[in-house]
Image (spheres, rainbow, N blue to C red):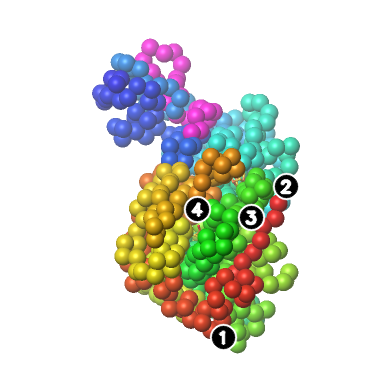
Amino acid sequence: DVQLTINDIPLTVPEGMSILDAARTVNIDIPTLCYLNLHEMRLNNHIASCRVCLVEVEGRRTLAPACSTPVSHNMVVKTDTPRAIQARRTMVELLLSDHPKSCLTCAKNLDCDLQALAADLGVRNITYEGEETKFEIDKSSLAIIRDPNKCIRCRRCETMCNDVQTVGVYSAVGRGFETVVKTAFDLPQHETSCTFCGQCIAVCPTGALMELDQVDKVWKALNDPSRYVIVETAPAVRVALGEGFGLEPGTIVTGKMVAALRRLGFDRVFDTEFGADVTIMEEATEFIHRLKHGGRLPILTSCCPAWVKFFEHQFPDLLDIPSTCKSPHEMLGVLAKSYYADTYGIDPQKITVVSVMPCVAKKYEAARPELGQDPVTPDVDIVITTRELCRMIREAGIHFERLNDEEFDHPLGESTGAAVVFGTTGGVIEAALRTAYEWLTGKPLEHVEFESLRGMDGIKEAVIPIEGREFKIAVTHGLGNARTILEKIQTGEAEYDAIEIMACPGGCIGGGGQPYHHGNVEILKARAAAIYEEDRSKPRRKSHENPAVIELYKKYIGEPYGERAHELLHTSFTQ
Ligand code: HC1
Ligand code: SF4
């Protein structure tokens, strides 16, 4: 251990700790911009490029960056001297000198770390008016907008994409103030191997990386009287949307969210969770089918579109192992335009399905040509993120916190606890096991919570005994962890029966379209806890017990994994 003082407060911390982390143990906040250290995500952006964390260390002539300077014995640190504060202000002024001055109209307005820092440090004028760059804005993809002019070279996106996701889309080019983070060979985003997971957006401190904004498209549909507009909401949205209105992370706002969506003018408010229960009917049946007919194992979950794109690019030799199930929101979309439309006599061509997702990749997924009945009838028409829904609610002047709870519409709004746990890492496989167990044994499963599959470890493994057979299960989140597991499958080093893979650290609760967590992992943990709380509050916690799902199969689909199910609910993958 090392003893030192920071702002005259004596403290003892482990050797090797940075001044920044040491200061935080005694509630002293040193501002940061490029720094991002999330152990749970294997993310460590320690490049000390922005230098807004400069502090005075007694005995040194120059100021030290707190994020990358380790503590030493008897060190005397001052974080709040006029010299340190002025140095930080100067650094921010320099960053602003060549930054576009369009804060008021920037999509990141009020969520921007640079803007917040300028306010906190009292930057009132920019002394060094630098020339602004004129890079082209990359609008090539259906998910991500990249504006290199707003890049402050912190390289968080690069660390996230290279180290955590192991996709390697970005790298910094040029030197000094000419540096900018770009795609390899400056390719348009949609021509790279980008999975559209959106994790680079989640950690970008400015508006350089943003989701493609589709709010206007939704307003247009809502204001067109000839359209029947159906909305569906992902499991993870209800535990994060409240943050956009100042509520504590982990506040469950399901009822308020439904009320807000009705006020926005949607004709029907359905739940992606109904689609998740249907997914389990299909995926559990597919799993049992493979078991009984010598099909290839492990089965891999296929509901995460960034993960799907990742394995299509990176593991084309494994294309036959993922489940062929469409993702839950796609299933709900196709059922809205078939089952629901048929039952209520609505022309499917008049239906617009809008998905509200914690995810950026869902925007790209919805446009995949195979995910629709024909080229002009996609299963899902428009995808907006949790953040975009926040903006719509604000635009409409709805006082979200004061709304009374309302219920989803019947029948595609009915769901079980198994569906809500889809929203956090481990949940999809837990939901599948709740059903597969009962179907394989014919006995009721008393204890539905599979603790060994829960938590934030990057790779979780469990052996679940069912009817004398030991099932080997793995759960990974973050694409780097997925790569590790898949490489072990390729070499035969590991054998599993089923694997859940989600691209985003934490699963959908940590999706690239969620309210920004600004590097605070506690926010993800609070959202996960809320997911499990919502599960416990449900009267039914197994997908096959959802009465509306049972009715769907009885009246419309027939057997799970049967002919009609294949036609509507399954898909295929391409290299
Ligand atoms: Fe997800 Fe899913 S859980 S992918 O993480 O399978 O986005 O929440 O909606 O479709 O249900 C996301 C979340 C979501 C799908 C479901
Ligand atoms: Fe990398 Fe994901 Fe960003 Fe694409 S969206 S560049 S894969 S972090």
Q: Which mark is residue 320?
A: 3
Is residue 419 placed above or below 57 in the rendered structure?
A: below
Badge 1 element: helix
Asked whether 290 or 79 is in front, the reply is 290
How far from the left and from the top, in percent, is residue 575?
71, 51
Q: CA distance from mark 3 to mark 4?
A: 14 Å
How far from the left and from the top, in percent, is residue 495?
51, 46
The residue tagged 4 is: 497
Q: Residues within 10 Å of mark 1 (few under 14, many from 20)?
A: few
- Please state the extent of the stretch shown in magenta in the rendering: 44-66
Instruction: Tell me the amino acid under the disc marked 3.
Output: Asp
Decide whether residue 185 is among the magenta residues: no
Tell me which corner region of the image, top left, top right, bottom left or bottom right, holds residue 71.
top left
Instruction: Tell me the amino acid under the disc marked 2.
Output: Glu
Q: CA distance from mark 2 to mark 1?
A: 42 Å
Mark 4 or mark 2, which has the lower sequence index?
2
Mark 3 or mark 1, which has the lower sequence index?
3
The residue tagged 1 is: 343
Q: Residues within 10 Å of mark 4 (few under 14, many from 20)?
A: some
Mark 3 or mark 2, which has the lower sequence index?
2
How far from the left and from the top, in percent, is residue 256?
40, 69
Q: Are marks 3 and 1 in contact (CB under 8 Å)?
A: no
Please, which residue is most extreme toward the bottom here? 345
